[in-house]
Amino acid sequence: MIIVEGKSREEVYLQCEKISELCKRYNGLEAVIGETKKEQSRVLRIRSNIYLALKHETADILDIAVPASNMGKLMDAIDEIAERFSTTIPMYGHAGDGNLHPHLMKDLASRGSDNLRQAKREIYRETVKLGGVMTAEHGLGRIRIPDLDICLNKKEMELMRAIKKIFDPNNILNPGCAVKPEENGKV
C-alpha cells in the first residue's frame, strides 16, 4: 500500500502509473487506486484489518526497522528464516521508513518456546546486520530487553545505565525495566 501526494492531480496520477508499472514488473497484484475519500478509507481499512486477521494465530509481533533501501533484503531473510523453522511469518509495515512488523505465529511457539526465541533472535540479527534496529515505533518494552545483547554490547548497556542513574538517581522512572545482568544473567 503506497500513499502518494503531489502538487497536482496529474502529478499524483503519473506517480501512481510509475508505481503500478514497478509492481507489475516485480509480480505485484493488480493496483487499486483510492481516488475518493471513501475509496481511500476502504483501502486503508485493509491494512488495519491485517492485524485483526492474524491476531488469533500470533505468538509475537516484532517491530523492526532497517534503512528503507534494505527492506527487501530483510523480507527475503525473514522468508528464509521462516523456511528453516517450517513456518510462515506474515509481514507488513511502513516501506517509507523501513519499519516492518513480522508476526511469529503460534505454530512455531507450539513446537517449543526455544523455537520462537531462536526465530526472533535470528530476525533481530539479520535486522542489525542490515543496519537496522530491533524496535522502531513501539519501543522496547519489557519483552524486548532479553534480546538487547544483539544490538548493544555490555559497555553500551553500562553507559546507558550510568546516564539513567544521573537523571534518575532514585530509580523511579521505569524501575526494573532494564534488569542488571548479574540479576538474571541477561542484559
Image (tube, rainbow, N blue to C red):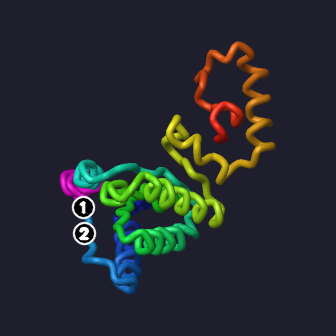
Q: Is residue 135 above or below residue 89?
A: above
Q: Residue at x 54, y 73 (%)?
A: 73
Q: Position of residue 86 (x, y in %)?
A: 37, 71
Residue 26 versus residue 115: which sits nearer the camera?
115
Q: Nearer the viewer, residue 154 or 79?
A: 154
Specify whether 157 is left or right of 84: right
Q: Position of residue 176 (x, y in %)?
A: 60, 25
Is residue 170 visible to us here? yes
The residue shown at (66%, 31%) is: 183
Disc 1 marks a residue whose amino acid type is: Glu
Residue 155 falls in image quadrant: top right
Q: Is residue 67 magenta?
A: no
Mark on residue 35? 1
When asked about the image quadrant of residue 162, the answer is: top right
Q: Residues within 10 Å of mark 1 (few under 14, many from 20)?
A: few
Q: Residue furthest top?
A: 170
Instruction: Label 2: state its secondary structure.
Output: loop
Mainly helix, strand or loop, the magenta region? helix
Span colored in magenta? 35-48
Q: Disc 2 residue type?
A: Val
Q: CA distance from mark 1 to mark 2?
A: 9 Å
Nearest to the eye among marks 1 and 2: give it: 2
The quadrant in which residue 167 appears is top right
Q: Could you tell me which secondary element the residue under label 1 belongs to?
A: loop
Q: Tell me the residue that label 2 is attached to.
A: 32
- Is the residue marked by circle 2 packed among few (<14), some (14-19), or many (20+) residues within 10 Å? few
